[in-house]
Image (cartoon, grey):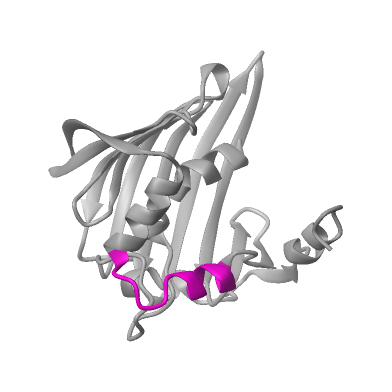
Amino acid sequence: MRSLLKSAGVAGLILAGCGEGTAEQFSPVKQVTIVYKQDGMQKGSVTTRHESYAALRGEENDLALEMMGIKQETKDWVVYRDGYIYRGDPIKKKITKTKDPVYDQVKENIKGKDPMDVAMMFIGGMGATKNGEKGEFAEEVCDYFVSAQANMTFCMTEDGLMLYMKAGLGPAMVERTAISVDRSDGGGADFYTMPRPGYTMTEGPDINAIMQGFPGNN
């Protein structure tokens, strides 16, 4: 499921970034908070936000998976900043910190590029194209894109905010629909401050080092 959502998130690498005051920006939107209703294999709500043209970004998940009489709840948050991924468990009050395996490469690749050109570059990499239809969610207008190779349909505003996304097939399908968009709030400093008060933080595995251990990557 996480790999599916990660694939879907590529459409919005608009929600990643490399720093206010630099030429490297993914999003032309300085700050935003979007609340989505999620349906499909996991149901509930997802809130995504970013600050400083997405130099700081994160999300909060409140989801439930129900299948064959089994119910599993996911309540966590994730913050991306300074080349690291911080995943927090609000119940156990624990944070796992891991190095973002693509941060350095992506930062170098977007240097000096217009943020919307960067967004379209990633969209093109997925084989996604506009289908000529428009949508409206949370009082924002968007254009629909379809990617057959990623089994994905999404609707994006002219300035790169994803308002709707449907990805996957059958029981693995995930659908997100924006129910509110607040361009005046990107979460605030407290949301991105690490470590958070009351939490313990541990180092997670080095994903780059693990990948280097696979055949063909040496």
Q: Residue at x 68, y 56 (%)?
A: 92
| Lateral position of residue 162 relative to residue 215, left or right | left
- In the image shown, does 162 or 211 lie closer to the viewer? 211
Over which residues does the magenta segment extend?
103-115
Q: Main secondary structure of the magenta part?
A: helix
Q: Position of residue 41 (x, y in %)?
A: 53, 25
Q: Residue at x 53, y 55 (%)?
A: 77
- In the image shown, does 159 or 42 lie closer to the viewer? 159
Is 109 included in the stretch rendered in magenta? yes
Q: Is residue 65 above or below residue 47?
A: above
| Lateral position of residue 75 relative to residue 162, left or right | right
- In the image shown, does 84 or 187 lie closer to the viewer? 84
Task: Place residue 103 in its image quadrant.
Answer: bottom right
Q: Is residue 138 visible?
A: no
Q: Position of residue 127 (x, y in %)?
A: 42, 39
Q: Is residue 2 above or below residue 28?
A: above
- In the image shown, does 56 or 91 lie closer to the viewer? 56
Q: Position of residue 76 (x, y in %)?
A: 56, 51
Q: Is residue 142 visible?
A: yes
Q: Position of residue 95 (x, y in %)?
A: 66, 64
Which residue lies most toward the top here? Answer: 68
Q: Residue at x 42, y 53 (%)?
A: 122
| Lateral position of residue 184 relative to residue 151, left or right | left
Q: Residue at x 31, y 37 (%)?
A: 129
Instruction: Name the quarter where the C terminus is drawn.
Output: bottom right
Instruction: Name the quarter where the N terminus is drawn.
Output: top right
